[in-house]
Amino acid sequence: MVLRLRADAFRAWTQLCVQALSTARAEIDALNVFPVPDGDTGTNAYLTFVAGADAVAALPDDVVLPDLVKAHTDGLLMGAKGNSGVILSQLVRAVFGDLDLGAEVRADDVAHAFRAASDAAHAAVGRPVEGTILSVARAAADGAQDAVESGAEARDVFALAAASARVALERTPEQLARLAEAGVVDAGGRALVVVLDATERALTGRAPTPAAQHVPTPLAASGDDFVEGGPAYEVMYLLDAEESEIPALRHTLDALGDSLVVVGGDRLWNVHVHVDDVGAAIEAGLQAGRPYRIAVTHFADQVARQQGRQRSGRAVVVAATGAGLADLCREAGAHVLEFTRERPVDVATMLETLRGLDAEEVVVLPNNQRYVGLFDAAAKQVRADGVRVAVIPTHAQVQGLAALAVHDPGRDFDEDVVAMSSAAAHTQHGAVTVAVEPGITMAGPCEAGDVLGVVSGDFAVVGSDVAEVADAVLDRLLSPTAELVTLVVGDGADHTVAQTLSRRLREERVDVDVVVYEGGQENYPLFVAVE
């Protein structure tokens, strides 16, 4: 029996992978002892797949499968974090690059794609090491080939490949002494198994048997014992370069350090390497092409944080418009910077606020697209003072409310940022406003006084009645999986609009909870959020 891949199933698979990695993230982080015990492999894998899934979710429903796959693989490549995240992006890219997406997929096609992925991942790594994600990927390819030879159907080839990967994961401590010393399996390999298990579930509907009933956390050991004599920095960047420049780049970077991974194609490459000379690693990229999104991590600082360094506290800074919204954020424990159209927040105020918090960790919710870059600039200066600052790119007030709802100062900083980022990113947002002058919008021309409906930052509805436009905005945001609708009423707005929407939802969607807040925001009679 053959398998035909569908666009709707592919979209669902991208989300299933994100959910599975979110569930396993803390466990995978705890397994992370190789090549550096910085405890972030699970988080990096999760964020990598979030980038891919978000790229797919941003496309209209009628986009065809090949375009969805390209968006996903490009999103993975550009959003890949850490050594394992880069390798995972290459594995997915190679699998779908080998399949004919417009044809029926046969069992031997699946096996060939798994082999192509394993080969591509090995080729991308400067010095492959047994007992890592590469070993697990090769075992999956072997399992797929064995499945074909035994006469398995296409769907079951995925399942048998995943089963082989689980067995290989259990063997990783036998292949790599550092894993055996810590009493753990390989973190990157575990992340790959999670993705393969999610794929098996998506294709067969069966939840696979876990690799082990209990995966141990690392035995107590010093991070210095694990990385003694190793490079001090992780350098990552995206690179715009011709493919002909990549062999020389690999050769140069390989001589500078270890854990080298270079993946990509079509002038877009993701470069990852561990080095002592950061400048030389970036210079190599400049000689090959145009490096950008350069990220440098000092392992000593990261390992110290993972080993429980004492902190002086965590603060959340929120930009809010409207007295009601500002009060809601303060009640949630946030430091609020209020703004209006006439009184925007400037970089100097942001910088003064961040420096005056006396906190070692700060999470920032800009809640306005114009403020994201400004807060990034202020955060860069504060980080130089030794403060950890994460700017979550919230573009709407209701995204900030969703992020605040899951904020937990008792969690690890990275875990808290991931949870808040996920809540904000999965909040569909809209608004209702009134045009102050004639213009052309994405929904057509408008005149002064027309009511405009905003969906995800774009004008989507032009009308004359606030209630009708609000109803249309809600219709565009609602989905079968919606669980919570938040309505924020603006300054001087007609409260019956929110009441009517609430009554409609209670009648038509008993599965959806509705919350109404008095926001007090100017210019927008209503903000809408769907989670």
Image (cartoon, rainbow, N blue to C red):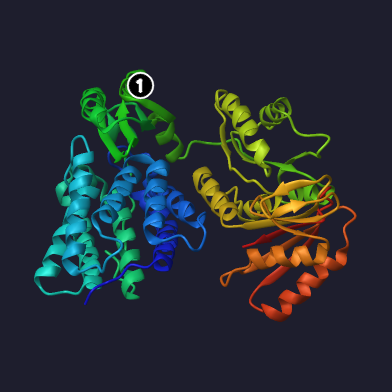
Question: Would you say residue 149 is visible in this rendering?
Answer: yes
**In front here: 299 or 455?**
455
Quadrant where the N terminus is found in the figure: bottom left
Image height check: is 87 above or below 14? Answer: above
Image height check: is 250 above or below 525? Answer: above
The residue at the point 27 percent across, 52 percent down is 97
**In front here: 11 or 132?**
11
- In this figure, which residue is indicated by the disc labeled 1? 286
Please identify the quarter of the rendering in which residue 513 is found. bottom right
Image height check: is 8 above or below 120? Answer: below
Seen from this angle, which residue lies furthest left? 149
Please identify the quarter of the rendering in which residue 81 is found. top left
The residue at the point 52 percent across, 54 percent down is 58
The residue at the point 27 percent across, 72 percent down is 3
User: Is residue 204 toward the left or the right of residue 342 in the image?
Assistant: left
The percent position of residue 165, horizontal first and vertical second, equals: 22, 60
Residue count near mark 1 (Cα–Cα under 10 Å), binned few <14, some 14–19, many ≥20: some
User: Is residue 142 toward the left or the right of residue 41 in the image?
Assistant: left
Quadrant where the C terminus is found in the figure: bottom right
User: Is residue 463 toward the left or the right of residue 201 in the image?
Assistant: right
Q: Amino acid at mark 1?
A: Leu
Question: Would you say residue 44 is visible in this rendering?
Answer: no
User: Is residue 444 toward the left or the right of residue 191 in the image?
Assistant: right
The percent position of residue 457, horizontal first and vertical second, equals: 66, 50
The residue at the point 26 percent across, 60 percent down is 100
Image height check: is 201 above or below 47? Answer: below
**In front here: 444 or 287?**
444
The percent position of residue 332, horizontal first and vertical second, equals: 71, 51
